[in-house]
Structures are given as C-alpha cells and as structure tokens.
Image: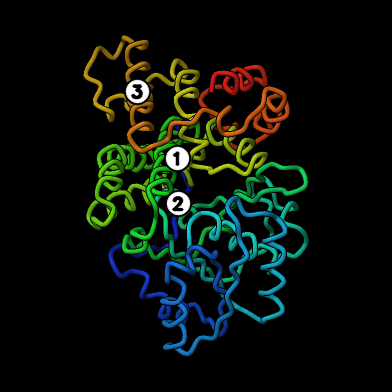
Amino acid sequence: MNDLRRIVIPEFMIGRGARFNAGGYALNLGAKKVLLVTDENVQKAGHVEDIAGLLSETGVDYVIYDRITPNPKDYEVSDGAELYINSKCDCIIAVGGGSPIDCAKGIAILATNGGNISDYEGVDMIPEPIPPMICIPTTAGTSADVSQFAIITNSKLKYKMAIISKMVVPDVALIDAETLTTMDAHLTATTGMDALTHAIEALVSTASCTFTDIHAIDAIRLIINYLPKCLQYPENLDFRTEVMRASLEAGIAFSNASLGAVHAIAHSLGGFLDLPHGECNAVLLPHIIKHNFPHNIEKYIMLARAFGFTGDVTDIKSASEFVIDKINNLNKEVGITRNISQMGVKLSDIATLSEKAFNDPCMITNPVEMSINDITEVFENA
C-alpha cells in the first residue's frame, strides 16, 4: 500500500494575545502597505482597530476594505482586488470570520493572477502565487484561516464556487480566543456546527488518512464537550479556547482530506438563498450521515464512539441512530431548530439546488457517490 501523502498546513500561533503579533509578522513578510480585509461587524467589535494600531507602531502603512457581506460575493472580491492594486499594497491581513477570510483569498488570487474569480473555480486552477497573507479568525468554525479552500458566491448564477488550491493557504494564522467573546449565541452555534461538520466529513472522506483522522476525532470530541458550554458561559475564555482549537484541528483535517455531500449541498443552498453556512451544514448533517453510514462503517463507528456509543459495533442500525440522535440533540441544545423549508427553500427550488450540489467538487470525496435523485431525497427530507 502506498501511504505517501502531502499535508498542507500554514504556520500558526495559537493562544490568548496571538493577534498582537500581526505587526511583527507583517514586517517579516516584507510588507510596506497592507490591505486589511474585514467586515463592518468586526470593525464595530474593535478587532480591526487593534491590528491597525499594531501596523502603525511597526511603520507599516495600511488601507481597510470592509465592504463584505456574509457568503462573500464575486463582485466584492473584484472591488477588493481593485483597491489592493490601486493602493499599491503588497500584503493582505484578513480579520474576521469565514466571509472576510474567503474574500481576502479571492482578492489575493486576482491581485497576482488577474481575470475574474470564477476563472479559478475548481481544484488547482491558480497558476501564480498569491501575495503574503496573514489571517486572524474572529469565529471558531470556518477554519478558513488554515485551509486550502476559498468559497465565493457567484452572484449571477446564485451558487457557491469552491476554489481549492494550496496557493490560498495563508502564510500565517494568528488564532486568538479573545476575539470570540464578541460573537452572539447564534454565530457561536452555527460556526461551531460548521467545525463539527468539517471534522466529520474529513473523517469519512475517501481522501482521509491517519494524520487527518487524528485531528478530526480530536475536533469532534472538543466540540461535543465545549460548544454547549460556550453558549452557557460566553465569556469563559477556557471554553472558547477549546472550541477555537477544535476549529483549527477540523481545518487541518478537512483541508487535507476534503469534505463531502453535506458541504456540497450546503454550498448550493447557501449560495441560492444567501443562508448562514453553518446552519445549512447543521441541518443537513444528520440526513447525510443516515445516507452515508453503510458505506464507510469503520469510520462512522469511530464517530459513534466519539459521541459515546458503547453498543455492539456490528449493530449498524443502532450506531447510526445513536449518532443521528446525538447530532439532532446538539442542534437543539445550541438553538438550531429550523428545517430547510423554514429557511426559505421551496419545492420548486429543489431540482435546481440538487443539480448545483451534484456538480460541487466536495461531492468527489463523499464516502459514496450520490445521484441527483439521492440529493433530491435529502432536500425533501431536510
């Protein structure tokens, strides 16, 4: 058996106060002028002001781009790239959740490669390296700060484009749980369930390996134990740190093992209706586990054990139902209770959504190949 694997991970610093090293890292990367990429909510929380102050102290100039919405759009990427080029920037620092970080990756792609962001959709489609990039996540779940994924919404066709390349792996991630205390309960819940989905899909992916499995299982256990505690005690930095570590480990896992049907379907759903990505994942996850479980029993039993299953491992039905019940209960515990109909999906939308999901690159590494009819059935049941 050939067990040769390539693992891609950025340099990262994790711990309270890690973000305060942004200025030093910018200098080390040779930055003269930084494009600070963020959104208005992160600006209001004061995180950008902190980083801007550090840059000023180290003599690095900067310009701020904050015209970014949830599920970042292709035109937001183009506008940011135009600002980067016109301002003669030479480095990017992304401060925020998955949307600012993914948008920053898109900006970086266009800064050195030109064209439209849709030109780079797919796997390994970026020919030229991007500018130096530092990421400072302010949510615990998207893992965009450590992954080789960038997800950008095609605003005309209303779907999410998956860009997968080691070119978009940041140079440095500064992972600091102190940024998480400004998140509200809903954002804490949805980003946490996003991290859980990353870990589970990486674990059962056809591209998984022992290295990614170790990180995936650890992330799953951390989220099960600490996400509800973060909602109960939102100011507790010890609990926040554990979920931040879970996000990091889930990111390392899925960035190198890829994802599966949950993300493929969530991309079609979120892009079409501009819905919260983590909530889409949380709602879809139990349905995909039910579909996939018989097709990767060994890994799903590992998942069941992580959730506390102590029954007979040959009783696949009981193990599957146990995991699904645990995830449904976790969703309820963290306040995710809507189904996709309540999220705005109409029966007339399902054919279009199913086709978009079928063509998503994340489907490639799902444990079992899914037909459009299979995907349609998931939508009808979710």
- How many marks do you count on the picture? 3
Q: Which mark is residue 143?
A: 2
* Residue hosting label 3: 323
Could you say where residue 247 lies in the image, as x and y percent from the top left? Answer: 38, 49
Disc with the residue nearer the chain's start (2 vs 3): 2
Residue 210 image offset from top left, x and y in percent: 36, 37
State the image coordinates of residue 276 (x, y, percent, origin top left). 53, 44
Seen from the viewer's position, the closer of residues 97 and 340 is 340
Residue 228 lies in quadrant: top left
Residue 76 numbered mark, or none: none
Residue type, numbered disc 3: Val
Query: Is residue 252 something one can see in this rendering?
Result: yes
**Local SS, label 3:** helix
Q: Circle 3: is it few (<14), some (14-19), or many (20+) Cα within 10 Å?
A: many
- Residue shown at 71%/67% (left/top)? 79
Element carrying mark 1? helix
Q: Nearer the viewer, residue 302 or 174?
A: 174
Inspect the image, locate mark 1, and give the three-letter code of the amino acid beneath it. His
The residue that disc 1 covers is 198
Q: Position of residue 313 (x, y in %)?
A: 28, 14
* Alpha carbon distance from label 2 to label 3: 24 Å
- Quote the CA–CA distance across marks 2 and 1: 9 Å
Amino acid type, callout 2: Ser
Q: CA distance from mark 1 to mark 3?
A: 16 Å
User: Which badge, 1 or 3, is on the more N-terminal residue?
Assistant: 1
Marks 1 and 2: in contact by CB < 8 Å? yes
Q: Nearer the viewer, mark 1 or mark 3?
A: 3
